[in-house]
Amino acid sequence: MGDLAFERRHLWHPYGSMREPGPVHLVAQAEGVWLTLSDGTRMIDAMSSWWAAAHGHRHPRLVAAMRAQLERLPHVMFGGLTHDPAIALAQRLVAMLPKGLDRIFYSDSGSVAVEVALKMAVQAQLGLGHPGRVGFASARGGYYGDTWKAMSLCDPENGMHSHFGAALQVQHFVPRPPIAFGAEWSDDPARNGLGAVEALFAEKADRIAAFIVEPVVQGAGGMWFYHPRWLAGLRALCDRHGVLLILDEIATGFGRSGTLFAMDRAGVVPDILCIGKALTGGMMTFAATVASDRVAGAIAGGPAPVLMHGPTFMGNPLACAVACASLDLLAEGGWLAQVAGIEDGLRRGLAPARGLAGVRDVRVLGAIGVIEMGEALDTGRVHGFCRESGVWLRPFGRLLYCMPPFVTTPAEVARICAAMVEIAGWQA
């Protein structure tokens, strides 16, 4: 058994303190939707291990793909070399993505995929003859990762990176899309939020390279589901003002929101797309940035004709091989019924939380369930309750949410919901 006293003294955890580290559960094994702790306690991984393990843990086809690749070629540098898994994955992505979105840059994490997208946008604008377009815009409430440029585009006041303050480069922000998913749409720009985008572009578009946003679902910045027509309106405004559109589908891609990509709900195709997390089914850290031919051509034809980025583990063969297996599972189509079933179970199971005094809102979309509380949750108390309830949840701030693996059964979804409703009742 691992030495947790040593672990507590020497290991940093995400968003954690070395002075007062939070409690941790020692996981010994994971299979399907279940995490087994060192003492034999079992918990449903209602988080899909930060939204990545869409097919569940240790899916046999993903394990087999990794084992087979491990025997042949675990890694080789991508500079000047290539390999079959990288090519095969590109073929799958090109077939899966909208026509014309087909120039693929592999990287090793979602944050890096965003950094690459931002570099692409600046270099493309330079190639298009707009050297002054070096800034970026976004909507408040967003989250794009923890690397330096990415976090400068997270919510500047209420986001988890707000305490970096003036150390971050100043970006341009509009209010978050105000009309909720499923609510009645208004064509009035003053009410639908697009008027703020129009005003920003009218004043500063000549300084903005791209607008980056999470399509339809704002993730770690607030778990807000907004109306797809806002995204369609944004696409039109970007086209009108020469601003490139970057969509961050790292959390929402590959079926999580109920469509293969969240952007599909709006019928929108970006200039640059970021994908990751479920790309490998949670088996390996891996991501990709996909650009249009126009963006790639602008970079190639500009004064800096090569894209200035190259991670050491770019195009890692193990990651590419397991990503191919993950996309093959998705291509078989079973995820669509699985996600629809989870959505139905979450809607029914979380409905009782609406009547609780401490609850501000309950939201469900695809395989995402959210209970928004009026006050911040006691994370330590929730952490202890996870072992008792047999459901692993990791809230942040006022948000208690789940993103279970697609293979979660109706009974397991009901168990997740029961745990969430019980936690929500603590503030009643």
Image (cartoon, grey):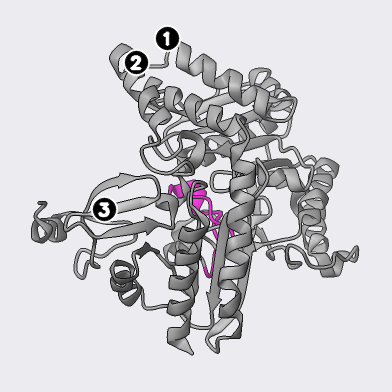
Asked where in the image residue 316 lies, by quadrant, the reply is top left
Residue ID for mark 1: 81
Badge 2: how crowded within 10 Å, few (<14), some, or many (20+)?
Answer: some
Q: Which amino acid is tagged 2?
A: Val
Judging by the rendered image, the residue that carries numbered circle 2 is: 76
Specify the segment rendered in magenta: 141-158
Amino acid at dot 1: Leu
Asked whether 148 falls inside the magenta stretch, the response is yes
Q: Secondary structure at mark 3?
A: strand
Asked which secondary structure carries label 2, the reply is loop
Mark positioned earlier in the residue sequence (3 or 1): 3
Q: Which residue is mark 3?
A: 36
Q: Is residue 315 visible?
A: no
- Eyeballing the image, is 4 above or below 69? below
Front-most of 212 and 86? 86
Q: Residue at x 36, y 29 (%)?
A: 63
Q: Is residue 89 magenta?
A: no
